[in-house]
Image (cartoon, coloured by chain):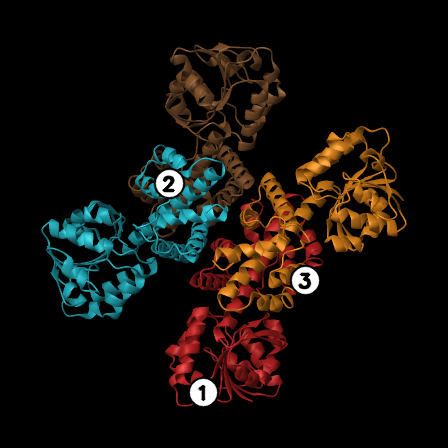
Chain colours: A red, B orange, C cyan, D brown
Amino acid sequence: MDVGFIGLGRMGRGMAASLIRAGHTVRVWNRSPEAAKALTGAVPVASAADAFRGDAAITMLADDAALRAVIVEGGLLDSPERPGLHLSMSTISVALAAELAAIHGRAGIPYIAAPVFGRPDVAEAGALNIVAAGEATLIDRAAPLLDAMGTKTWRFGDEPQRANAVKLAGNFMLVSAIEAMGEAAAFAEAHGVAGADLLDLLTNTLFASPVYKGYGASIAANRYEPPGFNLKLGAKDVRLALAAADAVGVPMPFASVLRDNLIDAMAHGDGDKDLAALARVASRRSGRA
Amino acid sequence: MDVGFIGLGRMGRGMAASLIRAGHTVRVWNRSPEAAKALTGAVPVASAADAFRGDAAITMLADDAALRAVIVEGGLLDSPERPGLHLSMSTISVALAAELAAIHGRAGIPYIAAPVFGRPDVAEAGALNIVAAGEATLIDRAAPLLDAMGTKTWRFGDEPQRANAVKLAGNFMLVSAIEAMGEAAAFAEAHGVAGADLLDLLTNTLFASPVYKGYGASIAANRYEPPGFNLKLGAKDVRLALAAADAVGVPMPFASVLRDNLIDAMAHGDGDKDLAALARVASRRSGRA
Amino acid sequence: MDVGFIGLGRMGRGMAASLIRAGHTVRVWNRSPEAAKALTGAVPVASAADAFRGDAAITMLADDAALRAVIVEGGLLDSPERPGLHLSMSTISVALAAELAAIHGRAGIPYIAAPVFGRPDVAEAGALNIVAAGEATLIDRAAPLLDAMGTKTWRFGDEPQRANAVKLAGNFMLVSAIEAMGEAAAFAEAHGVAGADLLDLLTNTLFASPVYKGYGASIAANRYEPPGFNLKLGAKDVRLALAAADAVGVPMPFASVLRDNLIDAMAHGDGDKDLAALARVASRRSGRA
Amino acid sequence: MDVGFIGLGRMGRGMAASLIRAGHTVRVWNRSPEAAKALTGAVPVASAADAFRGDAAITMLADDAALRAVIVEGGLLDSPERPGLHLSMSTISVALAAELAAIHGRAGIPYIAAPVFGRPDVAEAGALNIVAAGEATLIDRAAPLLDAMGTKTWRFGDEPQRANAVKLAGNFMLVSAIEAMGEAAAFAEAHGVAGADLLDLLTNTLFASPVYKGYGASIAANRYEPPGFNLKLGAKDVRLALAAADAVGVPMPFASVLRDNLIDAMAHGDGDKDLAALARVASRRSGRA
């Protein structure tokens, strides 16, 4: 397929590379053009509008502001040439997701949301878990692209923003897992048990899953650099989850604790470390870090 | 080996059966004698003292009060005949665990702590994960018993009570996982996504581990009876974790949320349901349950 | 002085009446014109621009959106005729307050922030506590107006948005007091003590202050209608406090609990009741409401 | 009246002195006898039993353990000479209070609970607020003593332990007020407003009550020594409130936050400072202390 790809951050690069490897033609655009030029096999284009056409356009931007700047304020929906489909893969607020679905509808541009789970190396390997929502026929049409980027596409019905809600719910659970490990490790250490030993046991038995093993290893080693997923981006996602929960009337006390502890972590200089550094808050508060 | 087994509750039954299957001689005692008589291949004895002798005595009782009643107030440590080793496998407070280590030391009775992870069916299958602490030579001596009851024994050094701290840390993480799933499911439902669909995705990908799959399936099905692990017992373990955290100066805000929500669950009649019913609190608070 | 007054909600009405009573000429504008016509002694004007001129213009609007709509999007700062001073008295976000200070500076319109503490009846009596920040000479110039509306003006330096931060801090403490009374009353009731008896003791001794007496009386009587200060407006202020805390890196765990409990209250239909209805959450969660 | 007084700590000393000043004969006993000898006008006695007789015996001890050691383990209830009334004024758990009521009943010793609100200087001045529960005729009989020690006796019915529940509820509200001021001050400071200025405004207006003024002044001055009420004693009372709430099924999320933050404070060396030092937690967590 002829695809435009907007946003070559750490995740976007790997996703675009997976598309190229699968034989698709990929026009790429990024705010700083170096990233576009560096991507082997890609066709760098001069403007977002040049990428926002063809069989499908994919957006993978950092946050609401970046996506809004490019799509809404950039006027892409009004350009004469339009894509056959907009595959919106960024992690964004449910509110913006709903707004985008509405304005694409008014502009007559087919639109589906498809945020992803997986770190940059998983994106590079084309092994993401993709959460898709929107008209089923559109998701079918995007299948060759989705299959190139992920191992599985999980479908969540017709309303695009539901996929974004699912993404935020997943990230909330991920950050909760880190907090739980952090508190448990601080508890263990205070009782004379090495946090690493505790986590070795638990992440190989009851909690033998990718999230626990990956973040648990960082906590066990007390090593948070280089970051895989920046703590401040995790904080952004918890904020989005809280806002979306507030909008529909759901108290989320765990998310509230996460918010406070992520602020604590950032206030102590850990915003650019790996999200696993959240675990240091429990340790520091117990007077041990 | 010639073993005495005290406490034939849902976990103890399966553990004793595993010992019998492995060829050990197992004298059993339980407060209500029916459970002892019902256990095929076991030798029911008339008193706890009759069980507290031989090569090793194993205790697997419901809580601090039950263990204290049998061992301390029952005067077992002063009886003329004593076991070669006391293998203390109950989930109890770190404080009582430390006290027991001390009084066994004074009484000259070898003592190790070895609480376990696993539900009753896992105990029955002899597939528990066993957390052992105490003198290494004692744990070595108990190996034939531990190997009969579990797939693996995880060692945590010389001080018995550290094993109990590890057990509480693990149960804290388990209850945290349930709370996180409960909040995420309530959030998803309020956004029009079935909680079951959300959990199907997450427990088969990022969180594909026994705890998430097991409790996630209950939450997805909104089915909390019959209980595998009673909510009020989970509440007891969270209380023990909080007390042990307080004793060593560790704030645990997730554990505090769990405590409040477990109280809420019990106040709404779910104390005898499965621990997964904790998930109903988030749903009820959002006005949806 | 010749004053324009924009926003005749429950608070604004009383404030404008106090100005009229003190002899000032008060041109008034409100989105729905009935309120302007009903105010004895006021001069209703046809547009916000007609009010935004003279010696001083006062704005007292419901929230960020309302103030932004009138001032920024309404283009008032670019109108040919301008007020000698803009006295911004609404409870708004610190972020919008800072933005307004900046754009007034660029437009050359003197600007001070002066949010208030007090319920509608206190506004009517001209007995508010006013929190003012901005250039001292400007606050001096506004003194005849401030003195007409309040018993005391508390000054917080040169940066206008600091007054807004103080207002949010105060409202956070107010909602915290209600939550504390709600939990204490639920605790007392569960121990057989009438919440009203508990609050009678405490609000007449240790906590004998206007906030505790006022809201405590509502809780004691379990009477939340008609509302003095709507619960959903209180929820708005807690949200603003949390956002402002996040922006400067301050964890506020009490505010987080308030947020969750206010969502719970609104999810159970109490959004339009008095803020004191927050106390019902603790009671309901204990299975007693 | 002929009174025995057991427990001459910082509070007990002032209360006994008030009784002496009112003309009562006061036999005093304290674990360390120096305090008894130092009290002008008192009659030091050699044993707790010598104090536990006469028209009334008053106990004012530090905690459950101290009261239990003297009364229950010390065997006072079985001594041949008994007091006409036991006035139990210590701040203790609701559970122990209920147990004491029961065992006094079995021993045939009239018993009322009468914990107090007020700092040591208020005790010295005979100006406490006293919370009494128990048979009305017994409280009537104790009136000359209560009136000597306090400005007002607040009655809470026939069951003595209800007075203890009220005392814990009050202390919970007191610690909540400190936490709210601490968070608000940290918030203000981060926005460039001196915490002292914020608290000056609020504790003289909305929150003009003894608790806010007293603790607010400490927080404003950032001065926590010498302690009026030790932080670790405040932590004890929050623990008692949480235990009593758990026993009757009441979630108390504010109390949970207090518990975590008090642990944080103690882990950072503030256990022996004044309870107002709880406010430092919010400041430290924001990276500013």
Q: Disc 1 residue type?
A: Asp
Q: Nearer the viewer, mark 1 or mark 3?
A: 3
Q: Are marks 2 and 1 on the same chain?
A: no
- For this rendering, which residue is in front, C57 or A190? C57
Q: Which residue is mark 3?
A: B209
Chain letter of disc 1 in the image? A
Closer to us: B230 or C87: B230
Number of residues whose C-alpha sits closer than 10 Å to that of mark 2, classed few (under 14), some (14–19) or many (20 or more): some
Q: From the image, tell me which residue sits under label 2.
A: C220
For the point 68% across and 48% down, which residue is it? B166
Residue type marked 3: Ser
Tag count in the figure? 3
Task: Tell which subunit mark 2 falls on.
Answer: C
Measured in 3D between alpha carbons, the distance from the residue under mark 2 to the one under mark 3, in whole angstroms, is 49 Å
According to the picture, the residue beneath numbered tag 1 turns out to be A50
Question: Which residue is at 79% across, 31% downward?
Answer: B77
Residue B59: give x, y in percent of width and height.
77, 41
Q: Are marks 2 and 3 on the same chain?
A: no
